[in-house]
Image: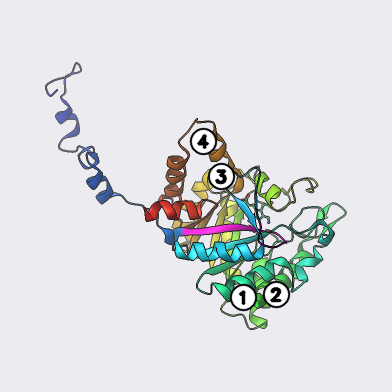
Amino acid sequence: MTGRHQGGRSVDEITGSRRLRRMRKADWSRRLVRESALGPDDLIWPIFIMEGEDKAEQVGSMPGVERFTIDRAVLAAREAQGLGIPAVAIFANIPHERKDQTGSHALDADNIINRVTAAIKAEVPGIGVITDAALDPFTDHGHDGVLRDGIIVNDETVGIIARAAVLQADAGADIIAPSDMMDGRIGAIRDALDAAGHQDVAIMSYTAKFASACYGPYREAIGTGGLLKGDKKTYYVDPGNSDEAVREAEADLDEGADMLMVKPALPYLDVCYRLKSELRVPVFAYQVSGEYAMIEAAAANGWIDGEKVMMEKLVAFKRAGCDGILTYYAPRVARLLAG
Ligand code: PBG
């Protein structure tokens, strides 16, 4: 209907010649003007590793996600490479008897993180391997650092993490991703890597890692679920803070971080946007286990279309300025994108 509306003006008079629906009218024109799109190059696949041989185990709280033995992880990495996924991120389920107060098994060159890294780099050299340098898989209290008298001791933890990072680089890790949020860890890791001749190993800092309630399923996946004493509020960023995340990022860049990561992803899209627009460096978002589980749970109940919600959320990270996304959906998305 053209003509006048009750208030007096016609739509043409209201909009002038501006009709934003013009370009939305067909699939081809929507595709043509789309500003952000997701491609396999944007994906990093976090994979869970466990001891044993030729086995994959479902993670209960993350339907569709499995824990792999090293041999299966190599197959997964090969599959990822075939799908065009640039990198995998390794997370390990460490047997309880290997855990202690200081996470000393992190300093064992032969621990499962280092073994799987070496195996993937030997068999699938073309894929990037990212290792997480925090101590939580190795501590018997589930914290990311050394726990003494109820306190996570910063400087001692930094020393251990820097040594663990060198062992990961020795095993072939391409990127070290410290997720512990201790002060000064990026500089210490950079120094330690350089001193060991690993100038070309990059650092992706979990720079803005929030004290979030969205990590629960991950803790089940790596077997630290029941262990955690207290919470991680004394070292992760408070969910109310955004300037503090920018300060963390500035410090990490000064100390030598090559890339920044925001975690969790969707509740902190504003932080992704700020880091990218204010600092202009590579920024990644980690769509964490709880974010994955929420989509899967609602989809399993028939309350949402899981696949569509997955794609909508992932493109939101691109729109917010992220260069890439760590997501448990990586292989599923890459398959979908391949058609
Ligand atoms: C810990 C670490 C966490 C995740 C990766 N490394 C969080 C935690 O347990 O505190 C979470 C990943 C996820 O939830 O998907 N250094």
- Residue 200: x %, y % from top left: 56, 78
Q: Which residue is mark 4?
A: 299
Q: Nearer the viewer, residue 14 or 41?
A: 41
| Residue name at image x 43 percent, y 47 percent | 316
Q: Nearer the viewer, residue 246 or 197?
A: 197
Q: Which residue is mark 3?
A: 292
Q: Which residue is mark 1?
A: 172
Badge 2 element: helix
Name which of mark 1 and mark 3 comes first in the sequence.
1
Identify the colour scheme used. Answer: rainbow
- As drawn, the residue found furthest toward the front would be 54
Question: Mark 3: few, some, or many residues within 10 Å (few <14, many ≥20)?
Answer: many
Badge 3 element: helix
Question: Mark 1: few, some, or many residues within 10 Å (few <14, many ≥20)?
Answer: many
Q: Is residue 24 above or below residue 282?
A: above
Q: Which residue is mark 2?
A: 167
Q: Is residue 50 covered in magenta?
A: yes
Q: Is residue 219 covered in magenta?
A: no
- As drawn, the residue found furthest toward the left would be 3
- Which quadrant of the rendered structure holds the N terminus? top left
Name which of mark 4 and mark 3 comes first in the sequence.
3
Name which of mark 1 and mark 2 comes first in the sequence.
2
- Residue at mark 3: C-beta within 8 A of ligand 1: yes
Question: Mark 4: few, some, or many residues within 10 Å (few <14, many ≥20)?
Answer: some
The answer to whether residue 321 of the structure is visible from this angle is: no
Name which of mark 1 and mark 4 comes first in the sequence.
1
Q: Find the distance from the CA under tag 4 to the CA under tag 3.
A: 11 Å
- As drawn, the residue found furthest toward the right would be 149
Q: Find the distance from the CA under tag 1 to the CA under tag 4.
A: 38 Å
Q: Find the distance from the CA under tag 2 to the CA under tag 4.
A: 41 Å
Q: Is 16 displayed left or right of 161 in the figure?
A: left
Q: Which residues are magenta?
A: 43-55
